[in-house]
Every structure is written in structure tokens, then in C-alpha cells.
Amino acid sequence: MTARLILIPLLILMTAANAASALAQDKGTLNPTPLPPLANPNDPKIGAKELFGRKVLPAAMPTRVFGFYAHGCIAGAEGLPINGDNWQVMRLSRNRYWGHPDLVALIKRLAAKARKDAGWPGILVGDMSQPRGGPMFTGHASHQVGLDADIWLTPMPNRQLSRNEREEMSAVMTVRNDRLDVDTKVFTPGHLAVIRDAAQEPSVQRIFVNAAIKKALCREAKGDRHWLHKVRPMYGHDYHFHIRIKCPPGAGECESQPDPNEGEGCSTSDLAYWFSDAVLHPKPPKVPRPPKPPMTMASLPPACKAVLNAPDAKQ
Ligand SMILES: [Zn+2]
């Protein structure tokens, strides 16, 4: 399967509250069209997503992370093979299956554990980062430095998915219609096992899930519950969960985030905000908010310019 696939930017309008869930469901395409070249790629006002979104392969540089999850880039990223013993990559047309080698290794390990602990045939992997990281045309504010990965809450089927299925298939909705709890017909002990396996990895710093999933994990986790503190409620995330690993050891230019609080985060008051009416049933703003100006190269570490301009890594 070729990596030379380029995302077609689609204008997607959505509210912050459902952004992540809608994006997990956005379909890809079997016939991605290359983006046209930019007339003025050196214009300092140009969105960095326009530049990073046109890179099909990683920078031929030693692996280095520059900046923060939500403003940065990565040199020498590694591609996750699209088929593994216990995993398959989804939405290939987005070309977002790149990350730090530590993240790639973690996903492979987690996939094998999912088979052993949850009895799943494996995991379906959603968005990681672009080949050189950076901001994206659609979706995530983070996923910019090769240290974030989305894992579908749909167990991998026991067969190889077709290209078409990988673009078109929808992930499973695990949250109940009233958003107050998980759908117990869909959310199984296997989901808990896979999320726990990820959270127990020492390099994992945070996992984002929908609040209804956090509530279910709090209720159902038996034995060691220390891992629960890493699992944080977040908007969306009802079709997938999001794994964030720490800055790799020795990655001096990687801007770290403080560890989450040690508490389980399971009390009623911990979760109250997420089940408030304002979060469950957000009202559209009276005056539509003007779109945010895109992040430019000036918002990224200066080293990201070199990452952008480096030749393609050989694959
Ligand atoms: Zn994510």
C-alpha cells in the first residue's frame, strides 16, 4: 500500500463539543487528489496546515520532537505498518499513521495485549500524526508531534479490511443516547481491558475518553485502580479513545505537559462538569464566532522550518 496519498481538505463545520466524535466518523476516499501547489509558500501569513498537509513523507532527519502536542512538529517519524498481526490502520487517505518510534512500538504492544486481555482479534488505529506532524486541515488541535494516537472503540474484525472499508466503515458508538452512561449493549469488559492496558503503559501520560466511558470505568474497574487517574474525560471521544505519551527520554526540544493528578477522578464532583446541562446540551452561540485565524509557522518552534524543508525520508 502506498503512502503517497494526500488528504482532500474538506470544509467541516462543527461545534467544539462534537468535533472529535464527528471527526472519527468522517469518511475518507479511495481517490485522494493531490493538493495544488501553493502560489506563495513563503508568505508568513500562510497557515502551517497548508505546508504540513502537503508533506507526504517524513523528513529525512534523525528522530526529534519539536514543541508541544498542540503546536509542534516531528522529524524522522516512523510509519505504522497498515497491517499488523493484531492491528489495522483506518482512513489511509488521511495519511496520518506516522509517529515517534516509541509511539509506534507502544501501539504494536497494545495491539498484542488487546488480543490477550480483551480477546479482541486486535485494534483499529485511527489518526496519529502527519508525516512531519504539524497542524492539520481537519480535526485535532493536538496530534502535532507524533506522540498522540486515536484507537477505535470497535474491536478489529477477524479478517483484513478492504481499502474501501477502511475509508467508509464507521466506528461503534459506545455512549448511550442520553449521554449519561455507556450503552451496555456495546461497551464490554473488553473495552475496559484495552483502555486499562494502555493506561498501565509507563510511557502513557493521558488517555482521553468520553465522560460516560470514564464513569463506566470508575464503576467497573476491579483490583488495581491506580491507572484510572490517567484516563481523563474529554469532549467527543465516544467512538475512539486517545492515547498521549510523554516526551520521550532525552527529547530536549519536546515541551512536556504536567502529569495528571493522582486521584482516580471518579467522584461525583470530579465528573459533575461533564454531565452538566451546558456540556450535554450545548446551545449554539447567539452570534456565530468568527473562525480562528490558522496557526502560522511563527506559532511553531523555529526548528519546524527545517523539518518542513528537509528532503523526504526513503521508505
Ligand atoms: Zn485524538
Image (spheres, rainbow, N blue to C red):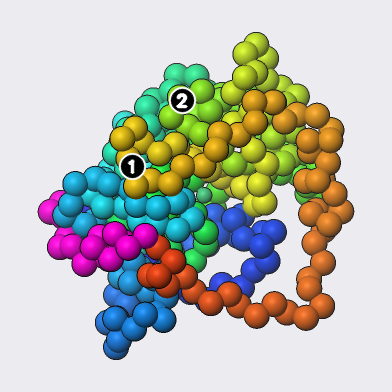
Residue extending furthest top? 223
Report the side of 263 relative to 297 (left or right): right
Image position, residue 300 (x, y; %)? 40, 63
Residue extending furthest bottom? 39
Q: Residue at x 75, y 24 (%)?
A: 219
**Front tag of 2 and 1:** 1
Q: Secondary structure at mark 2?
A: loop
Q: CA distance from mark 2 to mark 1?
A: 22 Å
Q: Secondary structure at mark 1?
A: loop
Q: Is residue 304 magenta?
A: yes
Q: Is residue 127 visible?
A: no
Please say if 230 is above or below 131.
above
Q: Is residue 248 magenta?
A: no
Q: Residue at x 80, y 53 (%)?
A: 280
Of the numbered discs 2 and 1, the one sitting upstream in the chain is 2
Report the side of 69 relative to 98 (left or right): right
Foreground pick, 236 / 77: 77
Q: What is the crowding at mark 2: few (fewer than 14 residues within 10 Å), some, or many (at least 20)? A: some
Amino acid at circle 1: Gly
Amino acid at circle 2: Glu
Image position, residue 127 (x, y; %)? 44, 51
Foreground pick, 97 / 302: 302
Image position, residue 146 (x, y; %)? 37, 48
Q: What is the magenta range?
A: 301-315
Quarter occupied by residue 29: bottom left
The answer to whether the residue bearing label 2 lies less than 8 angstroms from the nearest atom of ligand 1 is no
Q: Which residue does the numbered mark 1 point to in the structure image? A: 252
Residue 201, numbered circle: 2
